Amino acid sequence: MAEIKTSVIINATQEKVWDVISDIDNEPKFWKGTKEVRNISKDGNQISREITIAFRDQKCLQDVTIVPKETIKAVFTKGVIVGEKILTLKDMENSCELEAVWDVKLSGKMGMFTGIIKKHIKSGTEQALQAIKEEVEN
């Protein structure tokens, strides 16, 4: 599994950051690796969805769990990616920290390329967190 952990300090309230990141249908705006999102079902804070990723336009299924103002956990249940991505929001004095942690690998025979995609995921995550920061702070 490729573990990736990165974070950004955002000069805004936890609520303001949460308003942006909890709109998970808007994910492709910030996460360039996610091209399209299609919700399949929703039950409270549990969402099943299909995403199209930039890697060869592959479709992946995700189960997303939202803990309001704290975490968004996306578990990849089917597709070329296996594992999870967790966004955590930590309140700080006059700001907050947004952390992204990935624990993923490519499935099946593609698994040998996990190390190669780790760099792309890390770079894309850093870009996404920076784009979220800019959106919230402006």
Image (tube, rainbow, N blue to C red):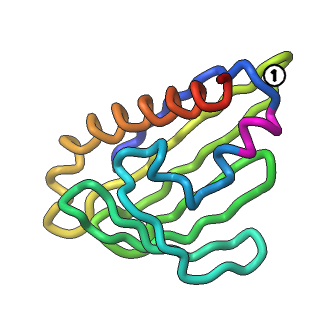
The C terminus - image quarter: top right
Q: Residue furthest front?
A: 138
**Does residue 4 appear to the left or right of 114 in the view shown?**
right
Residue 15 x/y as whole percent: 82, 39
Q: Residue, x 80% and y 34% (percent of image)?
A: 14
Q: Residue, x 47% and y 36% (percent of image)?
A: 128
Residue 4 x/y as whole percent: 42, 37
Residue 10 falls in image quadrant: top right
**Does residue 75 appear to the left or right of 81 in the view shown?**
right
Q: Which of 111 and 34 is in front in this view?
A: 34
Figure check: 65 above or below 68? below
Q: Residue, x 26% and y 67% (percent of image)?
A: 58
Q: Name the residue under label 1.
A: 92
Q: Residue, x 48% and y 73% (percent of image)?
A: 38
Tell me if mark 1 has few (under 14), some (14-19) or many (20+) residues whose alpha carbon lies within 10 angstroms of its own: some
Figure check: 83 above or below 46? above
As for residue 67 lying within the magenta part, the answer is no
Q: What stretch is highlighted in magenta?
A: 14-19
